[in-house]
């Protein structure tokens, strides 16, 4: 006999001596006489968890958290706390659900973002694909990658295609990077079990087909074409059939055997040296041409300078001559103007004298003086006299003489 306390938030089973069992919830204080109690385990689920409850009658119930349940062995077979599927953006899961009263099931694609809880009649598809080998991004192992949450965002993988032979039996390793994106999840589920394996196989097939038709040197010259999706027709067709899209393939380079690489490096060095020598000679010739052009330009500039000097001297001489002519013209013009002024003065004086003479003659005329005689008498004696005789016949046939005298004075 003893007191037993059931605290608040606890539950317990009370076993009596007669075999009866009852459920007690706290807070409560019990006096035990020929009986015992067993406290029940409290199981809690948070917001991203749920409780998977299995009952003794065989059915199962899932309760979304946050919630609490007590493990009652009278009705519960088990209670387990399980995580919900917390889906981010571009994440999805494939859920199968069994139809009621039927053996068939339905497929449902659940995409994020969100929190998803499985129902008792549902289960999630588990993917098992090729995965990267440990400590290597270019080697893949079958079944290495197992997961339930599918990545729907664009992704990429690195892959090395080993043992690729050219037309001249050169053994190469081709390095590529494949960019892909899932477009149809249902199509992928029905057409393939491992899309990564399909990518690797069909990429290898396209690379081998591209390289086998070319010699080693031809491959080196055309290897940039491996960046073009047109050379990956099989890979693109297969990806479309399984619900994927190959957006891009990047050629990351190649690797040859050490001996072949040494021979190639030697030939490349030789070709590079020849090309460098050729380019050096071209640069030297260009430098000579440049120097010659500069020399020609310099001579041309000197000639132009000399020519300009001559032109300047001629223009200066011309300017001096024009200035001299202008000065002479100004002097001659001033001289002519002076002479003109003097002559005008003389003419004016002569005009005044003539006017005075005219007034004098008019006065003499008024005085009835014969002006002719006056003028003849006022003239100086002529230095020379020329007499001209002219004969004319009258009516009687006799000749008459008529004379005219001209006087000349020095």
Image (spheres, rainbow, N blue to C red):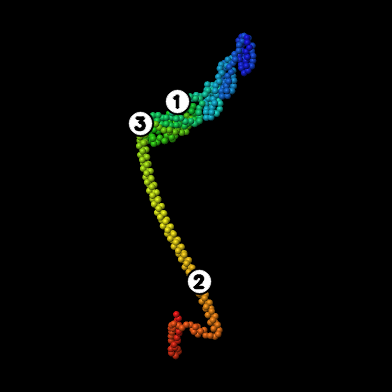
Kindly check if marks 1 and 2 are in contact, taking CB atoms under 8 A apart as contact: no
Discs 3, 2 touching: Cβ within 8 Å: no
Please name whichever residue, 203 or 85, is drawn nearer the observer in this view of the structure.
85
- Near mark 3 (Cα within 10 A), the count class, few <14, some 14-19 or many ≥20, is few
Q: Secondary structure at mark 3?
A: helix
Can residue 64 be seen? no
Relative vertical location of residue 119 with respect to residue 358 in this rendering, above or below: above
Badge number at residue 134: 1
Task: Please name which of the two marks, 1 or 2, marks the residue nearer to the observer.
Answer: 2
Q: Determine the secondary structure under disc 2.
A: helix
Mark 1, secondary structure of its residue: loop
**Residue, disc 3:** 259
Q: Give the image location of residue 320, x and y in percent.
A: 44, 61
Q: Which residue is mark 2?
A: 341
Q: Which quadrant of the rendered structure holds the C terminus?
A: bottom left
Residue at point 44%, 31% (across, down): 177
Q: Position of residue 263 (x, y in %)?
A: 35, 33
Image coords of residue 229 (percent x, y): 44, 34
Q: How far, Cα to Cα, is label 1 from label 3?
A: 30 Å
Instruction: Specify which label sits upstream in the sequence, 3 or 2.
Output: 3
- The number of callouts visible is 3
CA distance separating discs 1 and 2: 127 Å
User: The N terminus is located in which quarter?
Assistant: top right
For residue 336, above or below residue 56 = below
Horizontal arrangement in the rendering, residue 360 relative to residue 264 (left or right): right
Q: Give the CA distance from mark 3 to mark 2.
A: 118 Å
Is 410 positioned to the left or the right of 10 in the image? left
């Amino acid at each position: 006999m003893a007191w037993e306390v059931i605290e608040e938030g606890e539950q317990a089973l009370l076993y009596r001596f007669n075999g009866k069992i009852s459920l007690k919830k706290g807070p409560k204080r019990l006096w035990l006489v020929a009986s015992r109690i067993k406290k029940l385990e409290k199981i809690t689920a948070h917001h991203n968890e749920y409780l998977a409850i299995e009952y003794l009658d065989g059915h199962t119930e899932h309760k979304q958290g946050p919630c609490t349940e007590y493990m009652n062995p009278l009705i519960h077979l088990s209670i387990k706390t399980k995580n919900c599927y917390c889906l981010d953006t571009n994440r999805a899961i494939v859920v199968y659900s069994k139809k009621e009263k039927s053996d068939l099931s339905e497929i449902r694609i659940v995409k994020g973002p969100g929190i998803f809880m499985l129902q008792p009649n549902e289960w999630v598809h588990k993917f098992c694909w090729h995965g990267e080998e440990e400590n290597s991004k270019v080697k893949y192992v079958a079944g290495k990658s197992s997961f339930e949450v599918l990545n729907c965002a664009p992704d990429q993988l690195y892959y090395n295609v080993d043992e690729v032979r050219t037309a001249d039996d050169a053994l190469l390793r081709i390095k590529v990077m494949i960019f892909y994106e899932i477009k149809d999840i249902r199509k992928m589920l029905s057409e393939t079990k491992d899309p990564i394996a399909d990518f690797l196989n069909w990429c290898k097939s396209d690379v081998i087909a591209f390289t086998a038709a070319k010699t080693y040197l031809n491959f080196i010259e055309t290897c940039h074409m491996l960046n073009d999706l047109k050379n990956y027709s099989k890979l693109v067709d297969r990806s479309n059939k399984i619900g994927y899209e190959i957006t891009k393939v990047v050629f990351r380079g190649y690797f040859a055997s050490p001996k072949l690489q040494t021979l190639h490096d030697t030939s490349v060095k030789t070709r590079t040296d020849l090309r460098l020598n050729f380019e050096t000679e071209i640069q030297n010739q260009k430098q000579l041409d440049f120097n010659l052009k500069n020399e020609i330009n310099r001579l041309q500039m000197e000639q132009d300078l000399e020519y300009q000097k001559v032109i300047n001297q001629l223009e200066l001489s011309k300017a001096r001559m024009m200035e001299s002519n202008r000065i002479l013209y100004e002097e001659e013009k001033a001289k002519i103007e002076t002479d003109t002024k003097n002559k005008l003065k003389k003419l004016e004086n002569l005009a005044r004298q003539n006017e005075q003479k005219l007034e004098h003659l008019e006065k003499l005329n008024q005085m009835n003086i014969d002006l002719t005689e006056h003028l003849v008498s006022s003239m100086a004696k002529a230095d020379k006299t020329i007499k001209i005789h002219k004969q004319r016949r009258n009516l009687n046939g006799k000749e008459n003489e008529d004379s005219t005298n001209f006087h000349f004075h020095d």
